[in-house]
Image (spheres, rainbow, N blue to C red):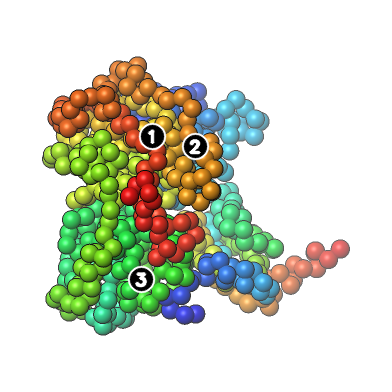
């Protein structure tokens, strides 16, 4: 990207960003309490950023949960991750490629 | 020790240094109010609307830089508080809203005044809490203060069901007070890169945002500006970081900037952004903002870097820390060609404020009040033409002197925010410039100001219109003025009288200058009606969506 040029949220990039269709898997470690799903989902929803897969279970240490999200690769994703990191209840965010096994394996429960 | 949840809240607020809380009681927060009535160190200020209470808290937080707390009941109390909290989110103001909620056994039953306060507050707060037990308050309250103050400040909402307020628990010790998290470590490589860019810059401009005020870094920012001898622009939120009359100040940038300010930005080769977020009202059309500049961007909020404009060097840091690290790497600069060029731009593209000498004119009233104010002063505004004129014309001297709703642009901000400022600074004079549209949005707080006998002077810039809407329709909607003019004029002098506030009309008085002087000299609250012609617009103006270079300079009437 050109220095000093428009950032990823500039209007033309926006449209372009939405056209790209590869999946990305996000792995979030979050505090295990009732509001945290809402914080994460609300963040995506209010920025009109689609999440098409969600998995969440407590980790071995019940004070934390692991939250897996499948989202579309998009130029705004970098900003979304930074926003996720700002949420008080989100302890860690990792980004994996589309080929991560987690959604593949549960996939069989979703094929009618 | 044995205390109820409500008593624990009040004690913890006392321990965190809270001394004045605005709010309104109701069924779901009565235990908290009962506990508050027994407090020896916290005063309660009874607002007349929860939005008013929220903006009073904002006024307190904006002048002190410390978190302020306000109270509301469940249901309508909570929904009324929302605009004030959302406003604090967009301007990064640390306020803590504590609401009552219906008892937990009634949640989900559509109980009287039950509303999903937690859910409603998610998108408009930095963080929010729902207290499930009195014990949880030991974590929640200190944590709320920590989050409100850490990094980029912001508003917090704590929802407390009535049964939690009434729950009696026994404990041995109070929790440790919440304190801000340590600032992030500085990346010295980026500091070096930034220093190189600044040292090599031929035409630098420093772009100062509200972050400079929030972080208490105004002095270091000023020292940096002076060291590199670079002109500086400020955002609406950054005004006061550098005195308006400082020789290197170019004032506010963007939609209503002085012409020379936006022209200088067009020519700059290095933009040094300090605690600023490239808001659209500041940048105009982004692609044409500082088209030739490389950018150094310093901000405590990582998500601001590269959000709108890509920076060549981005530094995530507290501004004070960053400037302290940066300064020794920077060579001082004397007067140079760029300073001369900016002086030339000032002469070629001057700021034009018509009728400054006339105290009854739109700019003149601001200039005269500024000239007559003495000692410690705070200025609040509402939203509209009057707000932009104050931003353009008032000679701000210090950080935190200027309180305005920047990000959300909420009409109704000025009066209650002024009350909050005056509560925290009883020795000072607080002036609120408002519009006849805006003041009606929280007019009920006039009586709050009277009850508290605050030294608050309200100037109603009265064009009997939603002036800024009128201006946009006139300029950009082919003069189709619709739903902007009021068909009946409100008599604000009488309204104020009804609220037992002293009031004056600048339009009918014989000697406006001595009227203003007398009002400012006499302690206590007062309202002054200032009749204005709605056809006088705020210029320059960048058309919404346009580039800053496309500003409209004036029209026939304002010329
Ligand atoms: C709560 C709210 N509603 C609507 C607006 C849109 N708006 C922006 S400026 C303005 C007119 C303000 O009129 P007034 O307070 O009389 O100030 P003037 O522009 O005349 O100085 C309006 C309606 C707003 N900013 N806030």
Element marked by disc 1: loop
Residue B57, position in %: x, y?
35, 38
Of callouts 1 and 2, the N-terminal one: 1
Residue A52, position in %: x, y?
70, 63
The residue identified by callout 1 is B463
Residue B377, position in %: x, y?
19, 40
The residue identified by callout 3 is B266
The residue identified by callout 2 is B484
Q: Residues within 10 Å of mark 2 (few under 14, many from 20)?
A: some
Front position among marks 1 and 3:
1
Give the spatial CA distance, label 1 vs label 2: 11 Å
Q: Quadrant of residue B464?
A: top left
Q: Mark 3 lies on which chain?
A: B
The residue positioned 17% from the left and 62% from the top of the image is B247
Residue B166 or residue B190, whichever sits in front: B190
Q: How crowded is mark 3: few (under 14 residues within 10 Å), some or many (20 or more)?
A: some
Q: In which quarter of the image is residue B386?
A: top left
Residue B102 or residue B348, whichever sits in front: B348
Element marked by disc 2: loop
Residue B70, position in %: x, y?
38, 35
- CB atoms of marks 1 and 3 within 8 Å: no
Of callouts 1 and 3, the N-terminal one: 3
Of callouts 2 and 3, the N-terminal one: 3
Task: For ligand 1, tell me if the residue under mark 1 lies within 8 Å.
Answer: yes
């Amino acid at each position: 990207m050109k220095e000093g040029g428009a950032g990823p949220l500039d209007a033309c990039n926006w449209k372009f960003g939405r056209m790209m269709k590869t999946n990305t898997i996000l792995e979030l470690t979050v505090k295990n309490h009732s509001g945290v799903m809402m914080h994460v989902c609300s963040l995506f929803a209010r920025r009109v950023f689609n999440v098409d897969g969600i998995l969440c279970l407590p980790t071995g240490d019940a004070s934390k949960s692991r939250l897996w999200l499948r989202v579309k690769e998009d130029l705004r994703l970098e900003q979304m991750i930074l926003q996720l990191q700002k949420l008080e209840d989100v302890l860690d965010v990792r980004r994996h490629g589309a080929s991560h096994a987690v959604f593949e394996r549960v996939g069989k429960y979703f094929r009618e | 020790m044995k205390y109820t949840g409500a008593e624990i809240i009040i004690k913890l607020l006392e321990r965190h240094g809270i001394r004045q809380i605005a709010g309104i009681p109701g069924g779901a927060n009565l235990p908290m109010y009962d506990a508050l009535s027994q407090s020896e160190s916290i005063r309660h200020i009874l607002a007349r609307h929860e939005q008013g209470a929220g903006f009073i808290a904002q006024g307190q937080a904006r002048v002190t830089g410390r978190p302020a707390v306000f109270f509301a009941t469940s249901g309508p109390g909570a929904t009324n508080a929302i605009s004030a909290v959302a406003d604090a989110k967009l301007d990064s103001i640390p306020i803590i809203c504590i609401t009552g909620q219906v008892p937990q056994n009634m949640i989900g039953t559509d109980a009287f005044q039950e509303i999903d306060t937690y859910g409603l507050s998610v998108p408009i707060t930095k963080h929010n809490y729902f207290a499930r037990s009195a014990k949880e308050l030991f974590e929640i309250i200190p944590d709320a203060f920590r989050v409100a103050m850490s990094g980029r400040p912001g508003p917090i909402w704590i929802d407390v069901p009535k049964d939690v307020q009434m729950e009696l628990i026994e404990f041995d010790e109070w929790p440790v007070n919440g304190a801000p998290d340590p600032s992030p470590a500085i990346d010295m490589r980026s500091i070096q890169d930034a220093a190189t860019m600044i040292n090599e810059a031929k035409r630098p401009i420093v772009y100062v945002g509200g972050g400079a005020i929030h972080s208490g870094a105004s002095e270091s920012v000023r020292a940096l500006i002076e060291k590199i001898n670079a002109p500086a622009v400020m955002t609406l939120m950054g005004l006061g970081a550098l005195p308006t009359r400082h020789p290197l100040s170019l004032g506010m940038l963007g939609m209503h900037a002085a012409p020379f300010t936006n022209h200088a930005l067009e020519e700059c080769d290095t933009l040094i952004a300090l605690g600023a977020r490239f808001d659209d009202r500041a940048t105009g059309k982004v692609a044409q903002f500082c088209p030739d500049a490389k950018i150094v961007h310093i901000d405590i909020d990582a998500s601001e870097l590269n959000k709108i404009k890509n920076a060549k060097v981005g530094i995530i840091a507290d501004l004070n820390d960053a400037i302290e690290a940066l300064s020794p790497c920077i060579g001082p600069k004397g007067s140079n060609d760029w300073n001369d060029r900016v002086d030339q731009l000032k002469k070629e593209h001057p700021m034009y404020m018509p009728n400054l000498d006339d105290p009854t004119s739109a700019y003149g009233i601001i200039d005269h009040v500024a000239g007559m104010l003495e000692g410690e002063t705070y200025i609040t505004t509402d939203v509209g033409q009057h707000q932009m004129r104050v931003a353009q014309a008032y000679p701000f001297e210090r950080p935190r002197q200027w309180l305005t709703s920047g990000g959300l642009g909420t009409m109704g901000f000025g009066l209650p925010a002024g009350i909050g400022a005056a509560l925290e600074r009883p020795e000072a004079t607080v002036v609120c410039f408002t519009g006849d549209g805006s003041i009606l949005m929280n007019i009920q707080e006039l009586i709050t100001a009277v009850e508290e006998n605050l030294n608050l002077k309200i100037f109603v810039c009265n064009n009997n219109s939603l002036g800024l809407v009128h201006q946009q329709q006139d300029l950009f909607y082919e003069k189709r003025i619709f739903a902007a003019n009021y068909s009946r004029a409100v008599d604000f002098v009488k309204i104020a009288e009804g609220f037992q506030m002293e009031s004056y009309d600048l339009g009918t008085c014989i000697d406006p200058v001595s009227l203003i002087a007398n009002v400012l000299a006499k302690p206590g609250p007062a309202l002054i009606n200032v009749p204005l012609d709605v056809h006088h617009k705020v210029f320059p103006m960048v058309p919404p969506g346009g580039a800053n270079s496309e500003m409209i300079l004036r029209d026939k009437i304002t010329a």
